[in-house]
Image (spheres, helix red, strand yellow):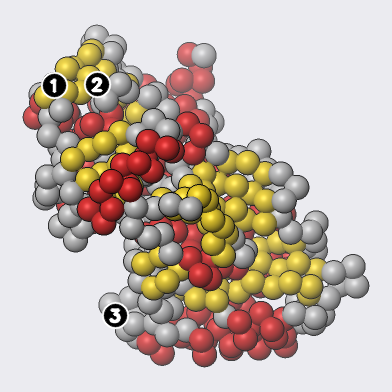
Amino acid sequence: MIPAAFNYLRAHTSDEAFAHLQQYGAEARVLAGGQSLIPAMRFRLARPAVLVDINAIRDLNVLRVNDHALTVGAIARDSDIERAPWINDTRWTLIRDVSRVVADPVVRQLGTVVGSLCHNDPAGDWTAAALAARAEVAVRGKDGVRHVPIDEFLVGSFTTAVGEGEMALGVHFPAAGDRTAGAYHKVERKVGDFATAAAAVQVSLGADGTIREAGVALSAAGPCAVRVKEAEEILKGQRPSAEVIRAAGDAASRRSEPQGDLRGSVEYKKNLAGVLVVRALRQALSRLGVQA
Amino acid sequence: MKVNVTVNGVPYEREVEPRTLLAYFLREDCGLTGTHVGCDTSSCGCCVVVLDSERAVKSCSMFAVQADGHQVQTVEGLANGGTLHPLQQGFWDQHGLQCGYCTPGMLMTSVALLKRNPNPSESDIREGLAGNLCRCTGYQNIVKAVQQASAAMGVQA
């Protein structure tokens, strides 16, 4: 299975890549890690006429934490995150969990966070995490760089807010307060398979021990990753308890709209989504020293 | 387009189509058939090679043009003359293979794994090799082989 022929353009700067993308528009695709794009091209599910390789653009190889955010540039690899110095900081536990279960360890050597967001697979891992962490994606267009909230970025299956001739430069995960932790729970038949169901959560506790902020999202539960607003509202302002967590899980089961397939029936997957939200919330809270 | 890829220390300058995958470049343009193609769709890990002495990558899911100017190590680059690499010796001693089809990928993934983590635990090894499928061994002896190599390489250093 050999991909259809294409023109290959290697960009050395973002300006150069952007100029190519502007010139070729819908004919062109960005090549970052290529771990979804290249298999798709081999199956001839994708047949771009032009590939713009951004792997040589050094200033996109960014993985940086400051007071405001964790910034992941367009060619930072999943495996770079696993080894980042801040990886044991509780605030980034959701990011850490995800970085360890995307695809398989060899694919993670090349696969990128931003590429996964741009691919927007219904069963993607980073999309659900970005929703729970309320990330923003930096997108360069004709009028400059705009920061797109993840809820607007994820338009539908394999579709994002990145328009023709535009490119995603990086993703920003906002730095939450000290008493913040997350967790990602995924069930898959085997390493590297698409998720049967997965849940991403992130919670911040206030000084009084109540839940100040909560992010809850599901993967493999609809056309693309979904935020479970009802679960977030159930959690917010409450003191962590088994009842509140169960109610959030039930809301996730209701929100989940999976497709029945060989990985499980609709009924099973809806139930599983709720179970995973409950487990992920318990783990996130236990990372903050709270048993619920 | 013209590419120049250094494979096992030897520069290979070749004219390739951009759609040529690295696995086929190695096998057909460089004549290095030690890199196997199993599933052809990035699932099985038979085609793993080491890029720039650092990253184990699936060469069926990377274009040869992306390796232009880079260093690639394949299974042919492991042995030093007649002396097997400690990982190869480990696979030999511990019966880490039966049919041998997955072995080049197992070896190259393990090379990168031991470079990053010279003293892996059993679970580090199992997790590190989770992208490589073997249908013969049940993995037990592959894990033992990597453990033996880890110990042997520690002694060397």
Q: Dot 3 corresponds to which residue?
A: A261
Q: Residues within 10 Å of mark 1 (few under 14, many from 20)?
A: some
Residue at which label 1 appears: B14
SS at badge 3: loop
Q: Earlier in the sequence, mark 2 or mark 1?
A: 2
In the image, residue B63 above or below residue A195: above
Q: Amino acid at mark 3?
A: Asp
In the displayed structure, B74 sits above or below A63; it is above
Q: Amino acid at mark 1?
A: Arg
Tell me which residue sits at (22%, 53%) in the image: A27
> Nearest the camera: B45 or A131?
A131
Dot 2 crowding, Cα within 10 Å, few <14, some 14–19, many 20+:
many
- The reply to whether dot 3 and dot 2 touch (C-beta < 8 Å) is no
Q: Quadrant of residue A91?
A: bottom right
Residue A31 vertical placement versus B70 (above, below): below
Circles 3 and 1 on the same chain = no
Residue wearing tag 2: B5
Instruction: Name the chain under label 1.
Output: B
Q: Secondary structure at mark 1?
A: strand
Give the image location of residue B91, x and y in percent: 31, 31
Answer with left or right where residue B128 lies relative to residue B17.
Answer: right
Q: Is residue A185 left or right of residue A214?
A: left
Q: Residue, x 15% and y 57% (percent of image)?
A: A44
Q: How many angstroms separate mark 3 from mark 2 (CA)? A: 43 Å
In the rendered image, which quarter contains the N terminus of chain B? top left
Residue type of the residue flagged with mark 2: Val
